Amino acid sequence: MAPKGGGLGGRAPIPKPKPKKKPKKEHQVVSSYNNALKKGQKTNSHKVTHATKFKNNISTSGKSYSSADLYRNNKLEIRRYYGKSGKVQTDIHYSNHGYPKTHPKVPHRHNWKWINGNWAPGK
């Protein structure tokens, strides 16, 4: 005689796992990031920081293909972009830092250069 419960010996059937959300394909994330970087816009993964007397800057590392803004006195001062490794790739500065001769164009960009994991100043 067959066991009750559909032949499973009285045990309940094992539920199927719910399908996981598929992450965006990396090329879509990279394409979106590069478009935002080119246009100076926020990325899909964006963070906002407000400068205080205790926190005066934003981190040099963040989530891959993300951006972050630093506001000082309620004015956007820096938009920072983090590349594939999560390290800073580019900053857009929205002031001349008090040096109009060396930074006549506002906003302007600073590209970061990393050599063997260490920051090497760029232009």
Image: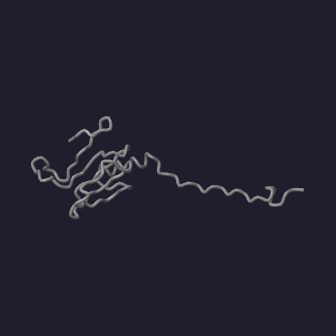
The answer to which image quadrant residue 75 occupies is: bottom left
User: Can you give x and y, in whole percent of width and height, for residue 17 in the image?
Assistant: 63, 55
Left or right of 14 in this view: 104: left
What residue appears at the point 20 percent right and 64 percent down from the top-left corner? 73
Coloring basis for residues: one colour
Q: Which of 3 and 32 is in front in this view?
A: 3
Left or right of 63 in this view: 122: left
Left or right of 52 in this view: 42: right
Q: In which quarter of the image is the N terminus?
A: bottom right
What residue appears at the point 31 percent right and 59 percent down from the top-left corner? 48
User: Can you give x and y, in whole percent of width and height, for residue 23 in the image?
Assistant: 49, 51
User: Can you give x and y, in whole percent of width and height, for residue 34 in the image?
Assistant: 34, 47
Q: Nearer the viewer, residue 98 or 23?
A: 98
Q: In which quarter of the image is the C terminus?
A: top left
Q: Which residue extends farthest right?
A: 1
Q: Which residue extends farthest left?
A: 101
What residue appears at the point 37 percent right and 43 percent down from the top-left corner? 85
What residue appears at the point 79 percent right and 55 percent down from the top-left corner? 8
- 72 above or below 37? below
Count the labels in the image.
0
Q: Which residue extends farthest front?
A: 54
User: Can you give x and y, in whole percent of width and height, for residue 70 in the image?
Assistant: 26, 57
The answer to which image quadrant residue 121 occupies is: top left
